[in-house]
Amino acid sequence: MSVRILHLFDHSIPLHSGYTFRSLSLLREQRRLGWTTFHLTSPKQGEGLKEMASQALEETVDGWHFYRTPVNAGPWRLLPGLAGLRLMQRLEKRLLQVVEQVQPQILHVHSPVLNALPALRVGRRLGIPVVYEVRAFWEDAAVDHGTTREGSLRYRLTRSMETHALKRADHVFTICKGLRRDIVGRGLSAGKVTVIPNGVDIDKFEPGGLPDAALKASLGLTGGTVLGFVGSFYAYEGLDLLLEAIPKILQQRPEVRVLLVGGGPQELALKSQLAALGLQDKVAFSGRIPHAEVSRYYDLIDVLVYPRRAMRLTELVTPLKPLEAMAQGRLLLASDVGGHRELIRDGQTGILFAAGDVDALSHALLKLLADKTSWPRLRAQGRKFVESERSWGQSANRYPAVYRALLGGFPLGAPA
């Protein structure tokens, strides 16, 4: 007999994001621990796909079975307050249906707070423990997206909702120390908050891979020293700062090229910036690629650059992609925001520079390119760090003690 856990997600595969990759990785590890997992997504899943197929109440994707919640509809969906309320109503109704069907012993709800509040209502009503896993704060993401500003009425209301949910959950998981400090600072006991850090599947990333010559040529990168970014193109990633630094870097290293892998809301702005700088022939965009292909693109890149801007979100939240870069044995240059400092040991597993400073970025990058003797050491120590501290298996091993305590010592099941 194994413990039955119902996970509630904002969205899942076939949508691709850091959120969905973390979800699948942790589910795989929970299954390896011998547990039975069930999976429900919010109406955001259907809104993200924008396909009629997304209206199905159940769906199997790549061998994973998901229960779906019908999308919101009607003109009021454009009004943030009413749309959020309606989303929670729909989600609570669907959650009750799925709980009745699968009979879970634990509700494990993942960000955002619009998922947590319905789950808490259902859990209290039916006497099921609810754990809440926080990956970022909804209000801080809204600031970066430009839908609100820090300190606004909407921001403060959302923060209040978040704190309400955190205090009422039976236990809180979060992805990093920065978020944990913020959560405990809201009045929760330290023992109620456990970090489940981002990790990597070590077996899927092999250091020392050789670049695919044909792929490199197709992107116009042959013969160049390649700087790269792999991830989503959000404003807080600071990719505009990297492009702004390129003219200065080219003065000393004319062979340098840039590869941007992924896509997102800033893509058009970045391409416009390139046109204004006259650098279109120096920067390649790969577009979004399947996660299974990402290692081929890492192998094209000499130095991964992550120039995140300093703001609450980047100071508190650790990203996933730098860990993949270290697992692949790539050199890593990143801004010194809090989320990066938690992952990268300056001069040991990567190089940090002052966030928001184009000159500091240029200087650090040129210094790294000139010091090839340090490259093998940085690469080896980055790989060693993820092997010893940041595998998904190590992260998932922090769940059992909490689950067991919530279930009064109930045996969770034997490893698969």
Image: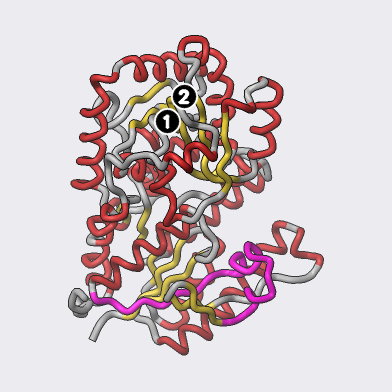
Q: Is residue 232 left or right of residue 187?
A: right
Q: Residues in magenta?
A: 34-57
Q: Which residue is mark 1?
A: 337
The one nearer the camera, 218 or 342, is 218
| Pointer 1 with pointer 2, Cβ within 8 A | yes
The one nearer the camera, 331 or 138, is 331
Q: Amino acid at mark 1?
A: Val
Q: Position of residue 34 (x, y in %)?
A: 24, 76
Looking at the image, which residue is at 54% across and 52% down? Answer: 160
Q: Position of residue 221 (x, y in %)?
A: 50, 31
Tell me the crowding category of disc 1: few under 14, some 14 to 19, or many 20 or more residues within 10 angstroms, Cα based: many
Residue 92 in the image: above or below residue 397: below
Tell me the crowding category of disc 2: few under 14, some 14 to 19, or many 20 or more residues within 10 angstroms, Cα based: many
Asked which quadrant contains residue 329, the reply is: top left
Residue 360 in the image: above or below residue 1: above
- Residue 369 on the magenta span: no
Looking at the image, which residue is at 44% across and 83% down? Answer: 126
The one nearer the camera, 359 or 410, is 359
Q: Amino acid at mark 2?
A: Ala
Asked which quadrant contains residue 225, the reply is: top left
Q: Position of residue 151 (x, y in %)?
A: 61, 38
Q: Quadrant of the N terminus?
A: bottom left
